[in-house]
Image: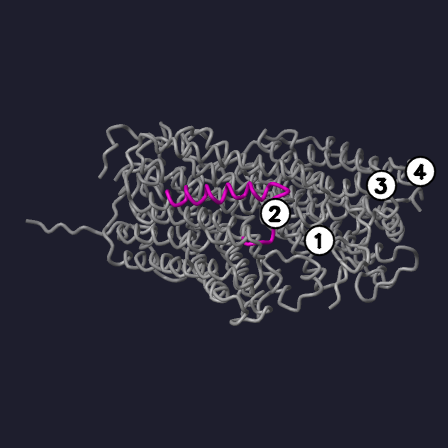
Amino acid sequence: MAGHISPKSTYLTIFGALMACTILTVVAAFINLGNLNFPVALTIAIFKATLVVLFFMHIKYGSSLTKLIVGTAFFFLGIMLTLTLSDYLSRGWFTAARGSTSAASIPSITGPLTTGARPLEQTPQNNPPK
Amino acid sequence: MPNGTIAAHDEHHGQHHPALQHHFQDLEQQHEASTLGMWLFLVTEVMFFGGLILAYTLYRVWYPTAWALGSEELNIYLGGFNTIVLIGSSLTMALAVRAGQTGAQRATVGWLLFTMALGLTFLVVKFFEYKEKFERFHVPGANFRFEGPESPHVQIFFSLYFALTGVHALHMVIGVGLMTVITLMAYRRRFSPEWYTPLELAGLYWHFVDIVWIFLFPLLYLVDRSHHIV
Amino acid sequence: METIVVEEPTTYINHQHTVASWLLTYDHKRIGILYLIVVTFAFFLGGLFATLIRLELATPAGDLFSADVYNRMFTMHGVTMVFFVLVPAVPAVLGNFAMPLMIGAKDVAFPKLNLLSWYVFTIGFIFTVASMVLGGVDTGWTFYTPYSTQGSESNVLLTGIGVFITGFSSILTGVNFMVTIHRMRAPGMTWFRLPLFIWALYSTALVMVLGTPVIAITLLMLVLERGLHLGIFDPRLGGDPVLFQHLFWFYSHPAVYIMILPPMGVISEVIACFSRKNVFGYSFVAFSSLAIAVFGFLVWAHHLFVAGISPYSALIFSFLSFAVAIPSAVKTFNWTATLYEGAIWWKTPMFFVFGFLGLFLIGGLTGLFLASLGLDVHLTDTYFVVAHFHYIMVGGAIMGYFAGLHYWWPKMTGRMYNDTLGKFAALLIFVGFNLTFGPQFILGYLGMPRRYHVYPPEFQVLNVLSSAGASILAVGYVLPALYFLYSLKFGAKAGANPWKATGLEWTTQSPPLPENFRTTPVVTEGAYAYSKREMRVA
């Protein structure tokens, strides 16, 4: 059975890189990068995961089918995240109070009532006598 | 009786590898099928954790303050230590598979035992982390207590913390169980350069569990360590 | 003169007789039969709930059940039919039986995993039935939060766990099928020589692998919230109940493609054989299966149009929901073109095919009504939706399943059933079905809401028609059970290829050998090489 046999040095090098990235991600977390902290942490994590997938799991030497399968998994995960967030991030657009176009700029946007709707006025029409 | 039937098969019976299952034509086809199957299973695992990641992402967008506050409550030393332990266990696992590929039977067993030890270390540390959470009333439910703003949202953070790390820990436990079986097989000289498929598949599973933690560590422990949100 | 003793040939049925040999089998054909038993039982159980529902709805007042009990009735009907009939029927029964034969393999890639699949399925079913016996669930099969996590006092945990367990059966089968199709095709069986049923099963398996884990984690979150009071969907903590809906439907919409893709594959097989023609536009039909599988993942939030999602997001999902209809239309056009200038052979399987074509067309087109945002606001949660999905699921999927059962029954059992009775059953089902669900389109448009056991008196006539149709439908479904069982003992011997069909499964004996083929077949031509000479078969 011919499987690619990586030299031990490859594994040790990758391990070293993973350790370095771990230290990097912790250090970066303590530096105030504002809104960039999250993307930076995510990028480093994705890089580490890629190293594990390519070298520890041997995808680099695998068949194109295997590569397609790995790609497909993350593609559909991406679909799930992106399309769902397309809902949440666009709630309150153009209909929120103060005519704001960005959901994030509205202080009350967090939480369930994100459509920007005002509470129902208590009029006789809305409150028919029982 | 036509050729290729039972009689003809019996003549060849002693000539194939004992691990070859009869519905496969040869060991190579079996190996390709097995690895493909494991990769597809890992796809299901990506989507499985993905659902929790979706919930996490949504609420992090909605409640950045609560996420920062909740993350502060996690022990970064224990989390960081566990990260190093788990990545180390991926290294030892890769070396175990490599030893299996080269027929180094004793090295295979050795590296596998090392991997299991590191995995168990991770679980022990996790136990102490959970214990601390329990003692500080950070377990969601009727007894949840958090002194500070946004306590209800922080409870959601901890719900996801326990769901994510709990499901991950369950996968670790299953992984350690798998390793036990594989180590026994290696000890009994079942693997050779010709056939080491279960070892390889167990390795893939273990690396996947490591990858999940590679994401969980920054997502849970490193939300706002620089205090730019809170 | 010597007496020639003809021994009964060895088949996968007669080579071992004990119960253990069935319950511990690795043979994909026996596993298919095991699934047939559980799925049939589930079908009649779900049908029992449907009967009770239609009995209640024959009158406007809630005279048979209280609202609470009625809620449990439609919930258990939905849970049983969706998870234990529609999802497994064609892939786990017919797919398990026929797929390895059709690609020239000895078995699936992982036979032991296949048996495990069946056990997981059956155990999940037992859990769910247990919860029914204990009083059932009243949340609807959709388990929406926060009612399912906080309000409902019914057996949500038990049912949730039961369905969670069953999901793993789907995952294992999906993995098994994909690997089998990739790696175990006979020599010469290239991708474009595969029967279209295999393309359909592959696409289905893709959806099973990608989608089922999401419902699994969603149910797990539901169980953790209800059982351990984790707060993920809890609005009192700032959680979003609509998040549950997003997660739930991310699987449950692709799930309906799990339910319809394999029956579509069956239609391709039967239509080719009984028109004596190659399927028109083979590669279009093949690729449309993949397209449905992929596109099906992009449309889920059309179930959330009125749940409070952003209208901009709703716009995107509405557009995508229109787009997903296109590959289904491609199939329908190609099937029609296949019929054109074919030599139609009117046997029972073909009756079910024509039933499918008409009913799936109506069901599919009414889906477009619901994809349209403005219309959906009016039609959602009414009987229009109920009619739409029953046209697809019952008129489409179940018809396709029955077409497949009637097509492959001779191969599975070595016996022919009574074809006249078969055609009669198909007609009964078609008439009964339309009478049951046709009026529901009108009821929905007029505003009758779903999941209510009472309704305004002006809706009674249509409801009575619907209930009357249901009684005809019931007879139509019981009939096949009877003549199939009868055929096992008294049916004519089928022979290897009673339909003179192409396809590797028909080159071997009926019932097949335990190991399927004596020698591995070698494939040299496409899947539907019907020649003009074979046009006349009757």
Contact? badges 3 and 4 (CB < 8 Å): no
In the image, the segment drawn in magenta is C354-383
Q: Quadrant of the C terminus of chain C?
A: top left
Contact? badges 3 and 1 (CB < 8 Å): no
Q: Which mark is residue A104?
A: 3
Q: Which mark is residue A32?
A: 4
Tell me if mark 4 has few (under 14), some (14-19) or many (20+) residues whose alpha carbon lies within 10 angstroms of its own. some
- The answer to whether residue A75 is seen in the rendering is yes
Tell me if mark 2 has few (under 14), some (14-19) or many (20+) residues whose alpha carbon lies within 10 angstroms of its own. many
Residue C460 image point, x, y percent: 49, 62
Of marks 4 and 1, the one in the foreground: 4
- The answer to whether residue B28 is seen in the rendering is no
Chain under disc 2 = C
Residue B8 image point, x, y percent: 33, 39
Residue bearing mark 1: B167
Chain under disc 4 = A
Residue bearing mark 2: C251
Chain under disc 1 = B
**Amino acid bearing label 2:** Tyr
C-alpha separation, residue under disc 1 versus residue under disc 2: 20 Å
Of marks 3 and 1, the one in the foreground: 3
